[in-house]
Image: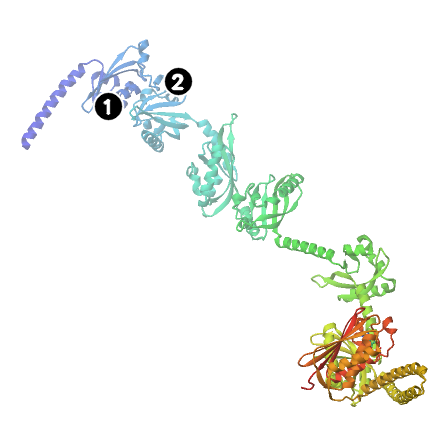
Amino acid sequence: MKNKDMSNAKQIACDTLAWRETLITMVETLSGAFFFIDDTQTIVYANASAQVITGATLEELRGNPFWRSAPQLVSTALYQAVLTTRQTQEPTEVEYCSPVTRSWLHVQLAPTVGGVMLQFHEVRAPAQRQELVPTSQPLSGAVLDGLHAGIAVLTPEGIVLEINEAPLDGAHLRREEVIGKPLAETPWWSFSPANQEQLRAAIARASTGETVCFEALVRPREELFLHFEVAIIPHVNADHHIEYLVIAGIDITARKRAEGEIHALIDAIPQLVWTGRPDGYVDYTNQRWRDYTGMTTEQAQGEGWMQTLHPDDRQRVLAVWQSAVQTGQPYEVEQRLRHGTTGAYRWFLVKAVPFKDAQGTILKYIGTCTDIHDKKQAEDELRVLIDAIPQFVWMIRPDGSSTYCNRRWRDYTTMTSQQSQGDGWLQAIHPDDYQHTLMVWHHARASGEPFEIEYRLQDGKTGDYRWFLGRAIPVRDEAGQIVKWFGTCTDIEEQKRAEQQLKASEENWRVLAETLPQLVWTTGPDNRLDYCNQRYCEYTHATLEQLQGYGWRQFLHPEEAEGVLAFRHQTLETGEPYESECRLRNGQTGEYRWFLARGMPVRDETGQIVKWFGTNTDIEDQKRIEEALRQSQARVRTLTDSKLIGIVSNEGGEEVIVEANEAFLQMTGYTQEDIDRRTLARARITLPEDAPLFERALQELAAHGQHAPFETELVCKDGSRLPILAGGVLFQDDPRQIVAFMLDNSARKELERRKDDFINMASHELRNPLTILKLQTTLLHRQLAKQGLQDVAPALSSMETQINAITRLVEELLDVSKIQAGRLEYLQEMVDLDALLREIADTMQQTHPSHSILVHSSVQASLLGDRDRLAQVFTNLLSNAIKYSPDAQTVEVELSSSPETATVRVRDHGLGIPREQREKIFERFYRAAGPQQRAIPGLGMGLYIVAEIVKRHGGTITVDSEVGKGSSFTVTLPLTRGA
Ligand code: ADP
């Protein structure tokens, strides 16, 4: 098999060779130049005509690139046709004017296996031929030749398809020397491998569809070097295939030279300088810059310079730079640049200004870097210092926008530096203080004067406001222009609060001072009055101005003025609070009133007296009361010391004497020790039988606070008895305190005793002659009757009546004496009250015909007693009833009884007895005081005896009466006595 294949291959090879020969012969015979090129556009075959045109043998041509070997034939149109033929595999025709020979060529192209066949015919240049040139073809040689710039059309591989006249002229080259050759091998570029490499790399990039721009040094001819700005633009067909490249180069040598000069100049500047293109591309850095950074200009170009920036600054700086480039504004930024050798960073202020042409188009940026490291460091130190200050520190521009706020401000407001910047800082001010702040600020801005202002700033954390004192001073440049304001805010919240409190307390104090009923004043340490309340002014009827200083002194009483002032002077020295009394004149009435002046010093922290606060209290009334009290006390003392009346005060249930005056001690012989030992209880110094009197007095005290004086006796220290008249007032209720008064009653008692003795003696003395007189009259009556001397009978009867009356009087007197002496005797017998009453009534009726005596009795009541004495009781009552009812017709006697008692009531319709006298009528010798009663004779003994007898029978007597209507006496007697 193998052999067979081998032989087949051989056979085919022989056949192919034969075919080739035939073909070549055929092609040679064809008119016009004829080329076969393969897919790499390398010449495979060229016929004789082609050899003539190219001026080379087939051997020389074969294996060489077509475009290079036949530059006379090259054009972009041909190149395009070759591409089209290969792409479409269809025959194509193209006609064009050779850029080299300027002869018109008609080319027929046909696809072959692995290549293209081209047949060239020279044709005449007809006038219309122009239109054969595709209108889509902008870069015909003719067009390009009109341009000054160097322009060429290249294949994507870099082979020159067309080139215009200008560069050829400059290089003294003919077109055919260039066309078809790789551009890199042309004289412009071939002088240096680096240049060639630069171009090749650019072409390679452009072949990928990218427009590539770069600057390059080219050498058109020996000794001539030019700077070119080169652009390679790829041309893309409808199928997005890159058909060819257009390369354009502009001679920028002159500019470069100028730049070079500038760079030389810049290099001489001892500052770091750089330049940038309008698009922001940094294109140059000066010697100083390079020395500092250790970077070459090439390294720094574009964005290479960023590498020397501190990493922390890069983003910020780039943003500022880009924004400056976009807006065309000057560029200014602080940044750190690395020192190339030490690696240390230093701060620079980098500024760049755009350099513009007459039309205002930016041509370049020129930048400088100024070393501000030391300043910045000093600033940083200052900033640290400022941040350490317990105040807010800030700077604002003359327009009021903030440029700096220290940390403390930021911490307090919780604003960032950015937020504070511009007008942001105003947000921290309390809305109520905002307008005022603005006003003060505008004023300061207009005047250029330092200013101070108090305002509230908000604590960003809590939302609360605190008071601050803001102070600002302007900072001026050499020309005196304000460049900024430097300010601080000091927290004065505590101070403010204290101030407010002080204000409030002062206000309170003043209100208090004005509401006080006293005269209120304050003086300085020198006693000069600096404030007084309205009341002071009203009292003195003077204004504050008149009272101020020492004006107040004129109102002092002349008698005391000197003393008062001396005293005040002394207190000023000692600094002690004082009280003194003085009289002040009422400014309106001119009269003086007493005041109590009180002064109190107020001291500062050092203990120095800064003020005196004082009040004058009107004590006139108090003074008067005191005086009255003093007088009354004096009077009381006179009374207690008078020795006329014994005064004791006793306490508690036992009424122990706790205090006694001298008079009492003298009266009773007790000593002060007895009093102090509290041994003199009432029971000890009074008689047991008088206890009821005292009990009654106590009841009276409880009811009325005092009791009517009564007679009693005191048991003296030596056991003797002292008659007294006792009175008392209740001083205090619980515990009970009684003040008792005792008047020595012994003299009166003695007199009474003597009077009683006299009455007793007189009545005894009278009774005997009376008894005889009565006996004699009776005898005489009888004798005269026997003698028949009837006409003297009335006279005798009258005599007897008078004697009876005197006898009864004397009897009564005797009875009274006996009662007084306790010697009245009583019988014990059964007495029938009913019978007794009727008997008395009968007797009385006979002697008193003027009245009808009516007896109402339906009960039998007997009791044990003295019949005559009881008869004396009722006779007395009946006789009074008749006597004191002169105009009445009747008197009534009524007897009633209960199992225990018998009650006799004697009633008349006469004068009646006034209430206040009702109790007294039972007293000895007491007679009612009315004129009508006085007209009726009597001695005031009857009821005394009656009461005594009733009492001795264990009964009671009461009176009920109405003046003008009559009285009713009720006697109640026990039926079974002692039972
Ligand atoms: P006299 O001798 O004055 O009557 P009495 O002791 O009998 O003395 O009475 C004392 C006083 O009481 C009398 O002075 C009289 O003023 C008054 N009196 C007594 N009984 C009556 C009565 N029935 N009506 C009015 N007054 C009376």
Q: Is residue 677 visible?
A: no
Residue nearer the viewer, 469 or 773: 773
Q: Secondary structure at mark 1?
A: helix
Q: Quadrant of ligand 1?
A: bottom right
Q: Residues within 10 Å of mark 2 (few under 14, many from 20)?
A: few
Residue nearer the viewer, 548 or 336: 548
Whether 185 is drawn above or below 561: the answer is above
Residue nearer the viewer, 405 or 686: 686
Q: Can you give x and y, in whole percent of width and height, for residue 5 in the image?
A: 7, 30
CA gap between label 1 and label 2 equals 33 Å
Residue 364 located left or right of residue 947: left
Whether 664 is drawn above or below 912: the answer is below
Which residue is outermost to the top? 127
The number of numbered badges drawn on the structure is 2
Residues at marks 1 and 2 touching, judged by CB atoms closer than 8 Å: no
Q: Can you give x and y, in whole percent of width and height, for residue 405 in the image?
A: 56, 46
Residue nearer the viewer, 357 or 728: 728
Reading the image, the residue beneath label 1 is 87
Residue 967 located left or right of residue 336: right
Q: Residues within 10 Å of mark 1 (few under 14, many from 20)?
A: few
Question: Which one is earlier in the sequence, the residue at label 1 or at label 2?
Answer: 1
**Quarter of the image containing the C terminus?**
bottom right
Amino acid type at mark 1 = Gln
Reading the image, the residue beneath label 2 is 146
Q: Can you give x and y, in whole percent of width and height, for residue 621 in the image?
A: 80, 64
Whether 161 is drawn above or below 387: the answer is above
Amino acid type at mark 2 = Gly
Whether 612 is drawn above or below 353: the answer is below
